[in-house]
């Protein structure tokens, strides 16, 4: 495939921080490692998919870059996308969960508020603050999501205190009463004398793949490049749940060995076993039987192969697993048609 400059797929990736490291590791695991000369360069390439231009951007800017079309696709936290995307705009989610950077967007209140355990308590408390002449102050980097969440739970009296710095110290420092922020383990919140509420989770977030509907729809070349990226990701993510199991089984013929394995269709592989002759020095009738099974059926498959006379069993994590046409890419095509 040949590309000119306008047909290069511009892929925005995080430029630093935890998500930078985890994103590069994810792309490498998918077999589409990113080549970046050094940390001062803001462009890169993917040798396995020529025609993709990598643009390193701040995580907070990636949604906007994709929305405006200066990037065609991008990897960003779902929380950042949900906060920054334009309703009915050109940016949309292609794949919602890439399997890493899991966290939650939560409301955290001082641990000293013993009687505040759920959002109904917060609604009552906001009224008390109002009656005393001021609104509840909420420090957050997510004003849009916070407002929607509070309004949806009957809280109308609060003031958003936007902050780009560390939020956990805001209640202790006195410039906010509560915070809404990302938390992965809750440790930092507890260390700053904060607690979450039973129903105070705004969003479950993780790394996701987003795209620009307009720029992708206008270029079949970009769509093909996006398909190659998507299928590598999809095959890798699916393969995490599967193992390839091979055993040497003695039998009169490959057909008979196959029939014996197919007696348990649930353990006979994605479609059925692969049976190949094993050439031994003695010339015995041995066959290598390979089945691909889900992780939760691995032990059952091992036991069954042993029961059918299998020896010399080896197990390997599948590298990529594809079930046919890419469901994610098909959804992308449907989104572009709409």
Image (spheres, grey):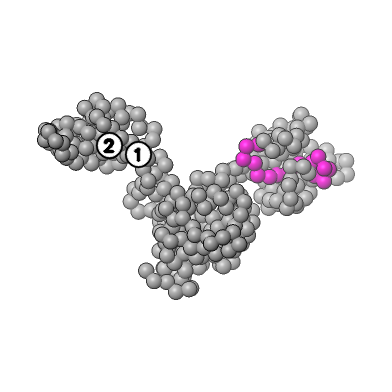
236 horizontally vs 314: left or right: right
Whole-percent x, y for residue 285 in the image: 13, 34
283 horizontally vs 129: left or right: left
Residue found at x 40% / y 45%: 238
Residue found at x 76% / y 46%: 138
Task: Tell me if I can see residue 38 in this picture.
Answer: yes
Mark 1, other Cα within 10 Å: few <14 / some 14–19 / many ≥20: few
- Which portion, as a residue range, is magenta? 171-186
Whole-percent x, y for residue 148 in the image: 67, 49
Taking the magenta stretch, the answer to whether it contains residue 35 is no
Residue found at x 18% / y 38%: 278
Task: Tell me if I can see residue 217 in this picture.
Answer: no
SS under mark 2: strand
Residue 246 circle label: 2
Whole-percent x, y for residue 119 in the image: 70, 37
Check contact, mark 1 vs mark 2: CB within 8 A: yes
Whole-percent x, y for residue 310 in the image: 23, 29
Count of marks overlaid on the render: 2
| Near-viewer residue (236 or 120) | 236
Mark 2, other Cα within 10 Å: few <14 / some 14–19 / many ≥20: many
| Near-viewer residue (298 or 37) | 37
Q: Which residue is mark 1?
A: 316
Q: Earlier in the sequence, mark 1 or mark 2?
A: 2
175, above or below 231, in the image? above
Corner quadrant of residue 130: top right
CA separation in Å, label 1 and label 2: 9 Å
């Amino acid at each position: 495939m040949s590309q000119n400059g306008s047909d290069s797929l511009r892929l925005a990736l995080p430029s630093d921080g935890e998500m930078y490291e985890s994103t590069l590791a994810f792309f490498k695991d998918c077999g589409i490692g990113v080549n970046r000369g050094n940390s001062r360069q803001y462009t890169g390439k993917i040798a396995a998919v020529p025609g993709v231009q990598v643009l390193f951007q701040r995580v907070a800017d990636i949604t906007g870059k994709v929305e405006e079309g200066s990037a065609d696709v991008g990897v960003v936290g779902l929380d950042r996308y949900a906060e920054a995307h334009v309703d009915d705009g050109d940016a949309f989610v292609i794949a919602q969960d890439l399997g890493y950077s899991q966290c939650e967007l939560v409301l955290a209140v001082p641990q000293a508020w013993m009687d505040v355990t759920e959002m109904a308590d917060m609604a009552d408390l906001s009224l008390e603050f109002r009656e005393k002449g001021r609104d509840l102050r909420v420090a957050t980097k997510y004003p849009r999501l916070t407002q929607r969440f509070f309004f949806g739970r009957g809280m109308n009296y609060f003031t958003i205190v936007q902050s780009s710095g560390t939020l956990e110290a805001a209640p202790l420092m006195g410039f906010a009463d509560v915070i809404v922020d990302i938390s992965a383990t809750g440790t930092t919140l507890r260390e700053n004398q904060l607690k979450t509420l039973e129903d105070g989770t705004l969003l479950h977030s993780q790394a996701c793949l987003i795209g620009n509907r307009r720029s992708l729809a206008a270029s079949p070349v970009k769509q093909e490049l996006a398909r190659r990226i998507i299928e590598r990701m999809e095959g890798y993510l699916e393969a995490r749940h599967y193992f390839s199991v091979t055993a040497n089984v003695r039998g009169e013929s490959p057909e008979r060995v196959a029939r014996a394995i197919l007696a348990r269709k649930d353990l006979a592989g994605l479609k059925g076993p692969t049976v190949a002759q094993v050439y031994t020095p003695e010339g015995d009738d041995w066959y290598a039987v390979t089945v691909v099974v889900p992780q939760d059926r691995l032990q059952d498959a091992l036991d069954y192969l042993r029961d059918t006379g299998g020896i010399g069993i080896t197990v390997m994590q599948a590298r990529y697993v594809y079930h046919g046409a890419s469901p994610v890419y098909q959804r992308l095509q449907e989104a572009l048609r709409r």
